[in-house]
Image (cartoon, helix red, strand yellow):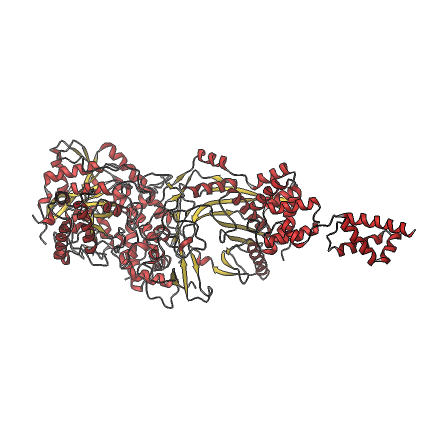
Amino acid sequence: MLTEQTKVKIGLEIHCQLTSLKTKLFCGCSADYRGKPPNTHVCPVCLGLPGAMPVINKKAVEMALMVALALNCKIAKTTFFARKNYFYPDLPKNFQISQYDLEGGEPLASNGYITLTVNKTKKTVRIRRIHLEEDPGKLFHPGGIGVSSYTLIDYNRSGIALVEIVTEPDFKSPIEARIFLQKLRSILEHLGVFDGGLEGAMRCDANISVEGGGRIEIKNISSFKDVERALNYEIIRQKDLVKKGVKFGMETRHWDEARRITVTLRTKEEEQDYRYFVEPDLCPILIDEEWVERLKHEMPELPDARKERFMREYGLPEYDSEVLVSERALADFFEECVKIYGKPKPVANWLMGDVLQCLHSLETSIDKCKVTPKHLAEMLMLMDKGDISIKIAKKVLWEMMKTGKTALTIVEEKGWKRITDIEILEKIVSKVFMENLKAVKDALIDEKAIHYLVGKTMEATKGMADPNLTNQIIRKKLVEWKNKEA
Amino acid sequence: MEFYWLSAKEIKEKILSKEVKVEEVVQILLERIKKVENKINAFITICEDEAYQQAKKIDKKIADREKVGKLVGIPVAVKDNISTKNIRTTCGSKILENYFPPYNATVVEKILVEDAIIIGKTNMDEFAMGTTTETSYFGPTKNPWNLACVPGGSSGGSAAALAAGETFLALGSDTGGSIRCPASFCGVVGLKPTYGLVSRYGLVAYANTFEQIGPMARNTYDCALLLSVIAGWDWRDSTSMPVQPKDYTEELTENLEKFKVGIPKEMVGEGTDKKIVKAVFDYVSKLEGFGVEWEEFSLPTLNYALPTYYLIAMSEASSNLARFDGVRYGYRVLDENLDWNQMFSKTRREGFGSEVKRRIILGTYALSAGYYDKFFLKSLKSITLIKKEFEEAFKKFDVLIGPTMPVLPFKLGEKIDDPLALYLCDIDTVPANLTGTPSVTFPCSFQDGLPIGIQIMAPFFKENLLLKISYASETFLQFNRFKPKI
Amino acid sequence: MEKKEKHISKSQVEHLAWLARLELSDEEKELYTFQLNEILEYFNKLSELNTENIPPTYHVIGKTNVFREDEIQQSLHQNEALKNAPKKRNGFFKAPKIL
C-alpha cells in the first residue's frame, strides 16, 4: 500500500475529443460516429486515399484555444501542424497530423496550470503543453487481442479532433491524479467543448517514477478509476523492483483493463523515431492578441468562478460548492432545482448525499438518470409540508430514480403520506392503548414508556404517523386515562 | 495534314462549327493511338468506353444548342498520378495497379465541367520519381522523335502522346522538372505554374512543397487554354492561392514587347552540353531583334539547388508513400501467417520499384533522429537563401532564360543504373520548384533530329508573360512545322 | 573490394528499411548501401552553404490561417470506401493480426 514515505512522481498525458464539433479536424465528415455502421463516416481525406489533402476546422482551433485559456496557458503566436510518422493499421496515412516543437513555431499553448483541492489543501498542477491532433481509427480483434488471427478496422473515428494536454510530473499520488482528471473534465464540460460521458472521449497515458527507479509510461487507461488502479499497481510493482535492486526505466507498458495489470509494450531500444516535420499541406496559424481577447470575452463560466458564485449567491460553504461544480451536469441540476424550490442548502445536501449515492448504486449519471430538478424540488416541498419524513423521502428518491415517477405519484401509490389527521391518529392511538394496557399503566408513571407507545403507534401506521402529533395525542390520552382512573 | 496533328484550338473550332462531331474526333484519335501505341507506350489506360460516352453526351448538348464548355470535345490525356473517379490510377506502380479512386482530382472536375474528354491515363516514372519514364512498372515510354531515346520524365507519357499525335492536350505534374523535362525532350510546350496556382487536390503526392499540375500541348495557345481552365483557388487545397480566374489566351500576340532577360551563368556553364548552350544563345540573340535586352549573371546558390531539392523531396516522399501498406487499397501479398509488420514490409517490397525504395530510404534517413538538422532542416534553410537570390534577380530582370535540360535526349537504358547521373539531369529545372517560380518550356531548335527546349522563368503569377513570350517565339521559330515520323 | 562506408552503413540501411517497413534482400541492402553513399557524398556539398541565423522556409508561398467552417460535407458510402480493399469483412477493412 502507498505509505507516506513513498516518493512518487506522476505526470499525465490526456487526449480529449472535442465532441461538440460537428465535423472532424481536417475534413467535413460528420463527427457523430458512435453507434454507426463501420466506415460510413469517411472520405478520401480521413481514409488517407492517395491525393487527398487536409483542411483545418476553424472551430477546432478556437475550442483548443479556449481550453488553453481555461488552463491559464501561454498561447503561441505562430503554430503549425507536424507529421508524426509511424506505422500502425489504425493510422490510414501511417502518419498522424499532430503538433511538435519545430524551429519557427511551437505547439498551440504551454506553461499553464490548474489548482486543485486535495484533502482540503490547495495544490497547483502545471500544464506543460496543449496541442491539437487527429484521432486514429479503431481496431477490433474478434475473440480478443491475443486470440484473434486477424484485425478488423473501422475508420469512422479517424480524423476526429483531439486536444492533447500534457502535465508536468507534479502529482505525488494516484488520488491527486484522479482529482485532477475530474476537475479537467468539469472545466472542459463547462467550456462546452466536450461531453465526458461519451465513450472514449477522454483517454489517458501516465508517466510514473518512484524513488530509486526509472520512468515508466503507461498507455491505454480509459476511466478515472482505472487511472488510480493502474498507478497504484505500478507503484507497488516498481517499489518491489527497487527493493530487489532491479534496474528499470524508459519503458512503455500497456494497462490491461480486464486483468488489472500492466504489461510491457516496448523498451528504450525499440523507442520510436517519429521523424517529425512540418505538415507541408497545411499553412501556419498566426494567433494575434485580438483573436485571443475575443475568445476571452466569449468564455463561459468555469468551475472555479462558478464555485465562487455559488458561495456568494447561494451562501453555500466552500466544500459544498466544490462538490457541486465538480461535474457540470450536477451544478446545472442544482441551479435548476433551486430556481423551482428556492432553498439552496437542502438541495445541495440531498445532491451531495443521497442523490449521488443513488446514482452510484444504479450506475448512472445525473444527466442520464430519471430524476429531474423538478422531481427533486417537488420531493423537498412535500417534506416541507410535512407530508413525508426524511426516512420516507429517501425511499421516495429511490423510487423516483428507478421509475421516473413524480414524488407525489409515488407517495400516493405507495400510501406513504404522513398521517396528520388528528381524528385518525386518535383512533389509532386508542387501539394501541387497548392492545398495550400494561405499557399504558407504565407510561402513567414513567416518561420513558411513552416512547414505547409512540413506537407502537408508528408500527401500527407503518411509520406514517406524524411523530410529534402522535406524541401529543398519546400524552393527551394518558391524561384522559389518568383522569378516568381517578 | 492529318486530323490528329491539328491543334486543340482548331479541333474546338471544327466542333463548334459542326464541321466534325466529337464522336468522330474520339474515333480518329483512338485509331491513331491504336496505330502507334505499341511503339510509343504513352498510355497506361486508354479510356475508350468513357471517351465515347462523354462524346455522345457532348454531341447531344451541341445538337440541343445547349451552352458548352471552354474545352468542348477536346480529348485530354491525364497523367496517371492524377485521381480520376472510377478510372484506374496507377502512378506507374505495381502497388496501385488495380486502384480505382472513388473521387476526381479538382483539375479533372474542372476539365470535365468544361466538356473535355479524358482519352486516357498516361505513363510516368513510378510515383513521379524519375527523369526518363524508365522506372514505370508498365514499361518505358519511347521518344517519338527517336524510339531508341528516352522521352524524359516523369510526365513522359503525356509529352510523348502529344508529340506522337495521340492526344490534343495533356496534363502533367512537375515536382523537380517533370513537365518541363519531357516537354523539352519531346519538343512540346509545357508549363509549371506558380506554386499554388493550380489545385493539388487529387494529385498523388510525391513532394508536396514543390509540385504543381500543369498544362502540356503542342503549341502555346492550347497550353494557355488548358491553364485557364485548371488554374484557380480550391478550398480543398490549403496551399492553393486565392487567385482570380483568368483567360490566359487573351493577351497572346505575335508581337513581343521589350523586356529584360537574365541568363544564369551556372545554367550555361561546364555541366551543360555545348550544343544546348549554343541553342540558348541563338534563341536569345533572335529576341534581340525585338529590342529585348539580355545579360549573363551569377546565381551562386544554384550550385546547392540539387541536393536541397532531393533531400526535401525524398523526405516528404518517404512520408507520403507510407500509406501504401495493402490494407485499404492497392497490392497486398498473400498474408496467411503473417503479422501486420511482416505484411506491410513484404507488400511494399514487392509493390515498389527500386528507385522508389531508394528514395524512401534516403528520405527516412534525412528525417531521422540525429540527421534531421544536418539534412532536412539545412535544406529548408538553403531554400530561404535560394529564394532570396531569385527575388533579387527578378528586381533586375523581367525573366530568366536558360536551357531546360543540360543534356540532349539520351538512349533508353543509358543512365538507369546510375541514380546520381540521373539526378544531375534535373539541375536546371529544380530551382523553379524550390522557389515556387512559374516556368515554361518550348522547343527552340533541333539537333540530330532531337528537340532542344528553352526554359523561361518569371516572377510569381506572371504566367501570362511566359505564355506571351512563348507564343511570339513560336511565330518566328515555327517549331510546329516539324513532326516526328513514327 | 569493399568501399569504406563514409556516410551510411549497411546496418543503418537495415534500420531505415525497418522504420519504413520495406523488406530488402541482401543484394538490395548491398546495392543500396553503395548507391546511397555515392548520393550522400554528392549531397554533402550542402554543408558548404552557410545557413547560420537563416530561418527555414516551410512553405514556398506564405499563406497563413487557412481554415474551413465546421460544416458537414458528404462522406463516401461504405461500399465506395471499401471498393479497393484487398480484404474486407462486414463493412470493416481486414488486416493481419496485431501480435
Tell me the quarter of the image containing the N terminus of chain C.
Answer: bottom left
Placement of B307 over or under B259, stated as above or below: below
Please state which of residues B60 and A284 is positioned toward the viewer in this rendering. B60
The x, y position of residue C68, in whole percent, is 38, 42
Residue sitting farthest toward the left = B1
**In the displayed structure image, the side of residue B224 where residue C53 appears, left or right:** right
Tell me the quarter of the image containing the C terminus of chain C.
Answer: bottom left
**In the displayed structure image, the side of residue A174 where residue B103 appears, left or right:** left
| Residue for point 85% across, 55% down | A440
Please state which of residues A485 and B259 is positioned toward the viewer in this rendering. A485
Residue sitting farthest toward the bottom = B337
Q: Can residue B111 be seen from the camera position used here?
A: yes
The x, y position of residue A42, in whole percent, is 38, 52
Placement of A260 over or under B442, stated as above or below: below
Please state which of residues A26 and B440 is positioned toward the viewer in this rendering. A26
Q: In this figure, what is the number of numbered marks?
A: 0
Q: Can residue B152 be seen from the camera position used here?
A: no
The x, y position of residue A97, in whole percent, is 40, 49
The answer to which quarter of the image holds residue A436 is: bottom right
The x, y position of residue B287, in whole percent, is 13, 35
